[in-house]
Structures are given as C-alpha cells and as structure tokens.
Image: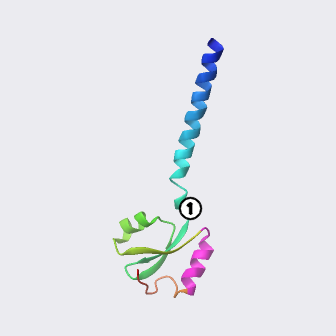
Amino acid sequence: MKKDRITVLALNALLLITLTAAVATAGRLDDSKYRVFCANGKMEVEQRTLEQEKNARGSNVCVLAEFDYLSDAEKYAENHGGKGSDCNCR
C-alpha cells in the first residue's frame, strides 16, 4: 500500500514537472522567429511577435515575412529595399 502511494506521488510529480516545462516552452516557440515588419511605413527586422511590435510601434504594423534565421530575414529585407525603406501593409 505504501509503495503504491509513493509510486502515485512520484508519477504526479513527474507529470507536474512535464506540464510546467511544456507550458513554459510553448510561449517561447514563436519568439524564436525573426520577422520582417512594416511599421509605420518603414521596414524593420525584429525578433518580436506581432503583438509586441504593435505595442512598441502602434497599430500600423504588419508582418511581411517570417524566418528561422536572422540572416534570412536580413536578406529578405535587403532584397526589398533594406531596413528603413518604405513599405506598406496591404
């Protein structure tokens, strides 16, 4: 009986740790992307989410592209006029 109780407690603790880790990493998955934004008519490369960028720059913001690597995001921006160049959210 005591052995069963210890087993159940150990499984509960393992489940709690696993769920906590899953929830913690779920919120960060999007944050690892590099995004090319059009913010107030100017192109930017940031690692922010759209919500974070809107909080920083206002509501006139959209995502033009999204990448796993900074170099890819910068290359996209350069091929479309470069950081700071004019852009629009259509």
The spot of residue 22 in percent (x, y) is 56, 45
The image quarter containing residue 39 is bottom left
Mark 1 element type: helix
Per the image, the residue denoted by label 1 is: 32
Decide: is 72 above or below 27: below
- Residue 78 on the magenta segment: yes
Is residue 69 shown left or right of residue 89? right
The image quarter containing residue 51 is bottom left
Decide: is 2 above or below 50: above
- Quadrant for the C terminus in the image: bottom left
The spot of residue 26 in percent (x, y) is 53, 51
Specify the color scheme.
rainbow
Label 1 sits on what residue type?
Ser
The spot of residue 40 in percent (x, y) is 37, 79
The image quarter containing residue 17 is top right
Give the residue at the far left of this rendering.
59
* Label tally: 1
The spot of residue 63 in percent (x, y) is 46, 73
Give the residue at the far top of this rendering.
1
What residue is shown at x 61% (from left), y 32% (from top)? 14
What residue is shown at x 55% (from left), y 69% (from top)? 34
The residue range painted magenta reads 68-79
Give the residue at the far right of this rendering.
3
What residue is shown at x 48% (from left), y 65% (from top)? 48
- Residue 64 on the magenta segment: no
Q: Label 1 crowding class (10 Å Cα cut-off): few <14, some 14-19, many 20+?
A: some
Decide: is 80 above or below 68: below
Q: Main secondary structure of the magenta part?
A: helix
